[in-house]
Image (spheres, coloured by chain):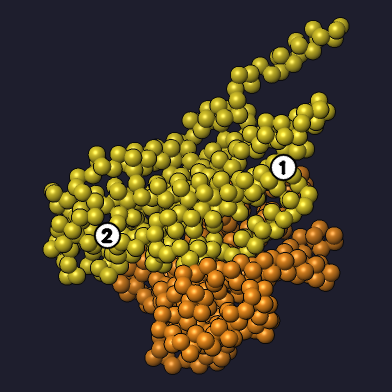
């Protein structure tokens, strides 16, 4: 009792700058000061806008074959007033196909990452929460998945499920499971040693309450960062699998990787057919990577000032 | 040291065992019945009977798995539907090309990435640093097959500086003893052939090398920017050591350890990239063979190659672990 005024005075002074600022709010404050983070956020925002508003933004219908005579093995229509980016390999408007391609990339990327995140986080949380033999079994399983390069894993899954967007999403998602599982397990194990967990234990809280209410929420930061980065990887992997002939079966469907593949037989007369979708993939992936990396740095406790 | 190797090899067993179960289940999950899947669409009933007999597809599952394992231990990884050759020998035929490509790609990534990372680390927080980091990121966000196509278009088709396909000019009629074409040229004193083989690898190596490049730059940068603030660096400087000595013996030796770790972890990604790069440049390696197997639904090849690649991958990871001992005496002691 006698010590109370002293304590409040000194601790209040020391804690002042941090009061009222959560980890995430602090992270966003730091993010908004970094040009790289802003560039990433702008790219991601524009990508989301284009993907969501595709039917409103696109000048024509997707996957049409209206202008096939403008795309032949000898000559391909480049930019023109009617078609600012020209005609694609199958006779559709290039700009329209690119805009719908953003939508396709977003859907596949988000669903695939969500599959990887949910399954991986479940495994990681299981291992992190129970430890002991559960941890051992789960992590051995994750090791097996990691022993196969993710592209091969995706190829084997696509071989079972056939050529479809669904197969693509599951194949890419499964490849991401080990990353999320290891990450969440690692950060949960790290939290177990933290003072507040010891304190919660000492207070006699139930293990379930500690794990669900304290350890898990505090371990999610790195997982969310990883999900942002994995969206970039997923978008690139979709293109790679399309290139290997495992993507959507329909050649005219607006998917960036697919568009590069079909542009190949006219590469020497119309290289831009491959360049446009390639640049779209690179810029989108760059946006998610910049945002993810900046988020990682901003959430890093060492960076908190 | 030997003890360490034995323990690590023993740890590998459960992983490979689990993987064999998964691959065993995988063939049975393929569309159609397994014999059909393994033989392809034009299989005759007799051939199907023969496969059912050899692999025991009519037996209970557990017996089947036992037979599969026994075959693996005999070195029988199945037979390619398309090429009618054993999967194991096909793998080792194609492996040298892939190793050559990966070595060139890694060498490029290290030679370019380590100095760039060093410069960025020394000047952390400056514009030079930011520029290098973003530049290395661009290398990693451009899909590798797209980059390969771009390089092929600019340097092989438009400028005609390099060849666009293949491992070596067939007209050179080079002797091949090991399957590593550059090495073959050197040991058979056919330097023109070795140079030609190397030239064929420049564009693919460049494209593939961008995958590890970004990670190497980032790791080196992080490690260098931490190490240069250590007390022993200040001591070395106070002792009046030349700055090159400090850089090589003190900064880089300590900074490179995490870089080596990353290199090991990158091998899986490098391999995935090799499948794509080899396909673009028609390099006759494991990746190109695998690509053909996907196109033709050559399932025994997929099954065998995945297991072999996992095995190889695990062995290389082990080698990377062992190499720490040479770089870091602290690891050697413990």
Looking at the image, residue A194 sits to the left or right of residue A90; the answer is right
- Give the residue at x 77% y 28%: A205
Q: Is residue B142 visible from the viewing direction of this image?
A: no
Do tags 1 and 2 sit on the same chain? Answer: yes
| Colour chain B is painted in | orange
Residue A162 in the image, given as x and y percentages of width and height = 42, 64
Residue A274 in the image, given as x and y percentages of width and height = 30, 60
**Quarter of the image where the N terminus of chain B is located:** bottom right
Looking at the image, residue B28 sits to the left or right of residue B65; the answer is left
Residue B270 in the image, given as x and y percentages of width and height = 54, 65
- Give the residue at x 69% y 31%: A214
On residue A129, the disc is 1
**Quarter of the image where the C terminus of chain B is located:** bottom right
Under tag 1, what secondary structure?
Answer: helix
Instruction: Return the residue at label 2.
Output: A252
On residue A95, the disc is none
């Amino acid at each position: 009792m006698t010590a109370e005024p002293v304590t409040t005075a000194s601790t209040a002074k020391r804690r002042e700058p941090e009061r009222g600022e959560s980890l995430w709010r602090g992270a966003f404050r730091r993010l908004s000061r970094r040009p790289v983070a802003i560039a990433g956020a702008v790219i991601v925002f524009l990508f989301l806008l284009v993907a969501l508003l595709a039917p409103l933004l696109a000048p024509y219908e997707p996957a049409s074959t209206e202008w096939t005579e403008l795309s032949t093995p000898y000559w391909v229509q480049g930019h023109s007033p009617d078609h600012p980016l020209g005609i694609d390999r199958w006779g559709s408007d290039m700009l329209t196909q690119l805009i719908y391609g953003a939508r396709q990339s977003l859907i596949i990327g988000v669903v695939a990452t969500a599959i990887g995140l949910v399954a991986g986080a479940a495994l990681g949380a299981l291992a992190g929460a129970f430890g002991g033999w559960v941890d051992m079994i789960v992590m051995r399983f994750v090791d097996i998945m990691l022993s196969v390069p993710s592209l091969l894993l995706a190829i084997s899954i696509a071989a079972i499920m056939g050529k479809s967007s669904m197969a693509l999403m599951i194949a890419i998602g499964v490849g991401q499971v080990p990353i999320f599982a290891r990450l969440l397990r690692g950060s949960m194990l790290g939290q177990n040693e933290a003072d507040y967990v010891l304190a919660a234990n000492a207070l006699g809280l139930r293990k379930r309450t500690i794990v669900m209410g304290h350890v898990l929420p505090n371990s999610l930061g790195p997982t969310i960062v990883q999900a942002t980065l994995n969206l970039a990887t997923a978008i690139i992997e979709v293109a790679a699998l399309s290139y290997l002939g495992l993507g959507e079966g329909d050649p005219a469907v607006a998917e960036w990787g697919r568009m590069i593949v079909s542009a190949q037989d006219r590469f020497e007369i119309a290289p831009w057919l491959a360049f446009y979708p390639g640049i779209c993939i690179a810029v989108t992936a760059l946006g998610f990577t910049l945002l993810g990396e900046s988020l990682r740095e901003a959430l890093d406790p060492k960076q908190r000032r | 040291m030997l003890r360490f190797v034995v323990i690590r090899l023993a740890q590998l067993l459960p992983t490979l065992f689990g993987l064999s179960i998964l691959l065993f289940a995988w063939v049975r999950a393929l569309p159609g019945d397994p014999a059909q899947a393994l033989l392809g669409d034009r299989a005759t009933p007799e051939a199907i009977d023969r496969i059912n007999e050899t692999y025991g597809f009519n037996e209970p599952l557990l017996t089947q798995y036992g037979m599969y394992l026994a075959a693996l231990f005999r070195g029988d990884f199945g037979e390619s539907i398309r090429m009618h050759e054993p999967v194991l020998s096909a793998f080792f035929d194609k492996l040298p090309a892939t190793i050559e490509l990966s070595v060139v790609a890694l060498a490029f990534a290290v030679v370019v990435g380590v100095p760039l990372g060093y410069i960025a680390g020394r000047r952390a927080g400056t514009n030079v640093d930011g520029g290098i980091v973003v530049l290395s990121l661009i290398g990693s966000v451009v899909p590798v097959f797209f980059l390969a196509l771009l390089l092929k278009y600019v340097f092989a088709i438009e400028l005609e500086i390099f060849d666009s396909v293949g491992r070596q000019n067939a007209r050179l009629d080079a002797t091949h003893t090991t399957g590593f074409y550059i090495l073959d040229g050197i040991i058979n004193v056919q330097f023109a052939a070795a140079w030609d083989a190397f030239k064929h690898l420049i564009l693919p190596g460049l494209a593939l090398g961008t995958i590890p490049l970004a990670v190497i730059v980032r790791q080196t940068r992080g490690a260098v920017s931490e190490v240069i603030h250590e007390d022993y660096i200040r001591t070395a400087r106070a002792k009046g050591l030349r700055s090159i000595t400090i850089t090589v013996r003190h900064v880089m030796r300590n900074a490179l350890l995490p870089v080596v770790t990353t290199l090991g972890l990158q091998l899986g990604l490098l391999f995935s990239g090799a499948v794509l790069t080899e396909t673009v440049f028609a390099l006759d390696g494991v990746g190109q063979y695998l690509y053909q197997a996907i196109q033709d639904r050559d399932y025994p090849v997929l099954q065998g190659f995945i297991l072999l690649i996992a095995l190889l991958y695990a062995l290389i990871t082990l080698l990377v672990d062992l190499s720490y001992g040479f770089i870091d005496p602290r690891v050697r002691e413990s």
